[in-house]
Amino acid sequence: MKKLKMNEKGITMISLVVTIILLVILSSIFTYSGLSSIRNNKFEKLRFELEMVQANVNLWYQQYIDVPNEEIEIGSPIPDSMLSELQGPTGILNKVKEIANNMNIDMSEDISSYRYFSKNDFESLQINGVENNYIIDIKKQVAILVEGYEYNGTDYYIIDQVKDVIRGGSLVD
């Protein structure tokens, strides 16, 4: 039989297990920070889109300030299929109205003052880069993201909410 030397070189089982554990820990840290970066980038993209839409709403306000709501020709009236989603105690308008009240933003309660803008509507107005649908009250200068955007447990619908997050804290988890 061959005798084992005490000084044989090689990797022990313990050092192999410790190395694997360290690699798993490091990879999970990098994965988490990568996912956090992706989430933050999506939020920043939304912020940019909301700012772009709001800038256009401000321009339209100047253009349509003296035009009655029913004569505004951009966007389209709110589709009947969306009314139940927008109105009522759990509707988007009610949620946004509550947010707007907390931020001292004047919002119309009349659904007929809002216009619906799809991605295609923005493209036809030669406004590129908008990927979401909005309801917009041009006279009150309010643009509402129809689907909302959930970030860190909060649903975001209007630019003032997003600006408040940016002013109030970091986007990094």
Image: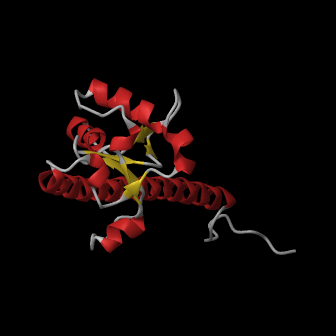
Quadrant in which the N terminus is drawn: bottom right
Quadrant in which the C terminus is drawn: top left
Q: Quadrant of residue 96?
A: top left
Q: Is residue 55 left or right of residue 135?
A: left
| Residue 145 sits above or below residue 169 on the image | below
Q: How many marks?
A: 0
Q: Residue furthest right?
A: 1
In this view, the residue in front, 133 or 20, is 133
| Residue at x 37%, y 66% (from the top left corner) | 121
| Residue 57 sits above or below residue 7 on the image | above
| Residue 45 sits above or below residue 69 on the image | below
Q: Quadrant of residue 98?
A: top left
- Residue 33: x, y in percent? 42, 54
| Residue at x 54%, y 48% (from the top left corner) | 80
| Residue at x 25%, y 37% (from the top left corner) | 164
In this view, the residue in front, 48 or 60, is 60
User: Which colour style is shown?
Assistant: secondary structure
- Residue 145: x, y in percent? 39, 49
Q: Is residue 12 left or right of residue 110?
A: right
- Residue 166: x, y in percent? 24, 43
| Residue at x 57%, y 50% (from the top left corner) | 81
- Residue 40: x, y in percent? 36, 53
Q: Residue furthest left?
A: 62
